[in-house]
Image (cartoon, helix red, strand yellow):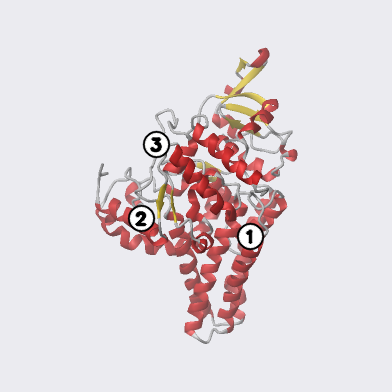
Amino acid sequence: MEADKTTDGLEGVKRKKFTWRELSKLNGRHNAHVAVRGKVYDVSSFVSRHPGGVDQIMFGAGRDITQLFESYHSLEVYKTLEKFYVGDLVDNELPVFPLPSNFYRTLKKRVDDYFKSANIDPKIDYWMFLRYAVFLLLSISCWLAGMTYHSSLLAVVAFGLGWGFFSAMVAMSCTHDASHFAVTHKPWVWKLVGSVHDFYHGASMYVWIHQHVLGHHPYTNIDGADPDIRTASNELSDIRRIKWSQKWVPRYFYQHAYVPMLYCVLGVKTRLQDFHILLRLRKYSIRLNPPRLSQLLLFIGGKLTHITYRLIIPQFFMPWKTMLLMNLVAEISGSYWLALIFQTSHVISEVEWPKPDKDNVMHMDWAEMQVATTQDYATDSWFWTVFTGALNHQTTHHLFPGVIQSHYMKITPIVKQTCEEFGLKYHYVDSTTEAIGCHFNHLKILGQDSKKVD
């Protein structure tokens, strides 16, 4: 095997060479290896001592975690890895990036200095727990009220809308923060908060972390790597055209009118797709490490709990047709809001859609790419920061994913200033409606133009 080959390392020590396929098999707690900047590290002896917890490091086992490592840690932490160095990675499964630029180093230092000078922990804001609780209680209250006043069709629709909307807010607050391990420094806390995604939303946090944290964030808008912009392998069969690489067909001409309506099924699609992803252990370009028994039980328990409270319990209090109506309204409300907010920052014509070279190498610093592929909006508004789950500060979120969202309003001005100093274009529009309009316009442009206009 390739991994049996050795090279002379530091001080004459023999080091192994690993292909990415060989590295991918080293994903168990007993043999956990990771790659960072082309070097492979055997961290199996460190798993139980990892300050962020076992789960964090095991999600990254068996893969190149360079961008995750650098975005969640200080760049000085590299020296901690050296004692675990066992060899080198000879090829790449997914795109790789140049060393951190002066822009990224300067920005990380400035944000770190801000937190230190203000004596603020970037992962802690206990007021956020109140926000989590309020959104969850409002969602549950609408669910209960819909069952209580089921004799009124207007009430069922109104409470269904509220149930879905506040469920979306739960997803954009506690679920999102927990998936980035940004809820305190205690692993049991973010796992407890994150379990809401399984039990209340009926969607798998295990699958979501692989897709979102290990897929979308490191490879934003890179075709073939970012699972969020993946389209059907047979381009003619895809429902929408969002990339110029897709072949244009006449049915895309009115996609700006019909595609947004399909966003209403996002929730159902996600819950059903979880099963397919778990069975294949793959979300498009992103491999999933085999789940531990506890993760598998959480997956099954979450699905069963979700079905019970959404479809079984209500039938004791309301006719089944009314129950289905309330569920339908809630699905439309929650899915539509989530989908729109998810699309407005990246799936637009105003940002870049970068490509690696033939060797899968990006010729753009990772942090600079995050700025280039993201658009922010209404960042001075407390209202929109709260009710978009701070995703209107998407650039800041991508650059500092391990920071809890309530701190973004303080960090974003630092990001803007640093971008300006280094001559980087910071994509921004003033309002949420303008931001959503950018996505609709992107659909219209790609639907009606078969070739990219320079």
Label 1: few (<14), some (14–19) or many (≥20) C-alpha neighbours in 10 Å = some
Query: In which quadrant is the C terminus drawn?
Result: top left
Query: In which quadrant is the N terminus drawn?
Result: top right
Can residue 1 be seen? no
**Secondary element at tag 2:** helix
Labels 2, 3: front one: 2
Q: Is residue 215 left or right of residue 69?
A: left
Residue 438's label in the rendered image is 2
Please report the residue visible at 50 percent of the width from the left and 71 percent of the height from the top: 330
Look at the numbered discs 2 and 1 and tell me whether their residues touch, using CB distance below 8 Å.
no
Q: Image height check: is 36 above or below 215?
A: above
- Mark 1 and mark 3: span between their CA atoms? 37 Å
Quarter of image, res 422: top left
> Could you say where residue 381 lies in the image, as x and y percent from the top left?
49, 60
Q: Image height check: is 397 above or below 87?
A: below
Please report the residue visible at 56 percent of the width from the left and 49 percent of the height from the top: 279
Please report the residue visible at 27 percent of the width from the left and 48 percent of the height from the top: 248
Q: Mark 1 points at which residue?
A: 128
Quick one: label 1 or label 3, which is nearer the N terminus?
Answer: 1
Residue 70's label in the rendered image is none
Residue 355's label in the rendered image is 3
